[in-house]
Image (spheres, grey):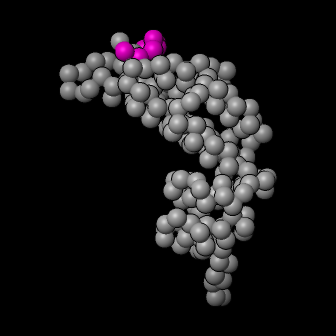
Amino acid sequence: MTGPETDNEPPETDDEPPEHRRYAHYLELLESVQEADEAGLVAAVLRDDCVAMAESAVNRHLERRAAQLLTDAHFPDWARTTAAVIGDRAFLSRRLREWTLLRAIALDEPWTAEEVTGASDWFQRTAAAAQAVSSPEALDLLAEHGRTRRVRNAATLRLRPPRRRPG
């Protein structure tokens, strides 16, 4: 086995590459992991020989957990623990920083225009569309300086007051 030792390995089939089976198995494990075991499981997945697959599985988990915890008081502790586990993996580190920035905007905590305009397209799309982000300042910034037309349009639409229906 090229990945970490885990219970209940997925059954082998001849028509599916082994990294695909491991990826699906990792997603299942990460979906149901207890909070106390999360960091250890993430670290185990990241030890898999297929770096791209392992990081993809961890990113899917990171996205799900960060969205769940975005405005929760446990987010900062989770983010610190996760940052320590993912270490210097550039993509995962950046995505975690961007989730932290999204949280700052959602909770009206300090953030800078440079952080928002310098963030990835993913971040800008997410911030322009996320219901948790209601900051007029952030939406104005994205409407004016979003990297893509999609981001600028989404932010502009969010800034408009809802139409009142007649009657």
Asked if residue 28 is positioned above or below residue 63 in the image, the reply reads above
Q: Is residue 151 visible?
A: yes
Magenta residues, start to end: 2-8
Residue farthest to the bottom, as pictured: 166
- The percent position of residue 137, horizontal first and vertical second, equals 72, 67
Image quadrant in which you'd find residue 62: top right
* Magenta segment includes 40: no
Q: Is the magenta region chiefly helix, strand or loop?
A: loop
Identity of the residue furthest to the left in this view: 14
- Given residues 8 and 60, the one toward you in this image is 60
In the rendered image, the quadrant that contains the N terminus is: top left
At 39% from the left and 20% from the top, the residue drawn is: 49
Which residue occupies 33% across, 29% down? 20
Rendering coords of residue 3 (x, y %)? 41, 17
Report the residue at 74% width, 42% height from top: 72
Q: Compared with residue 139, is residue 101 higher up or lower down, i.e. above or below?
A: above
Quarter of the figure that contains the C terminus: bottom right
Taking depth in this image into account, of 71 and 34 the one nearest to the observer is: 71
- x and y percent of residue 58 in the render? 50, 32
| Residue pictured at 45% horizontal, 14% vertical | 4
Horizontal relation, residue 32 to residue 48: left or right: right
Whether residue 40 sits left or right of residue 71 in the image: it is left
Numbered label tally: 0
- Relative to 40, say whether 96 is above or below: below
- In the drawing, does residue 47 fall left or right of residue 139? left
Residue 3 in magenta stretch: yes
Q: Which of 107 and 137 lies nearest the eye of the viewer? A: 137
Q: Nearer the viewer, residue 32 or 158?
A: 158
Q: Position of residue 41 (x, y in %)?
A: 55, 20
Q: Is residue 127 visible?
A: no
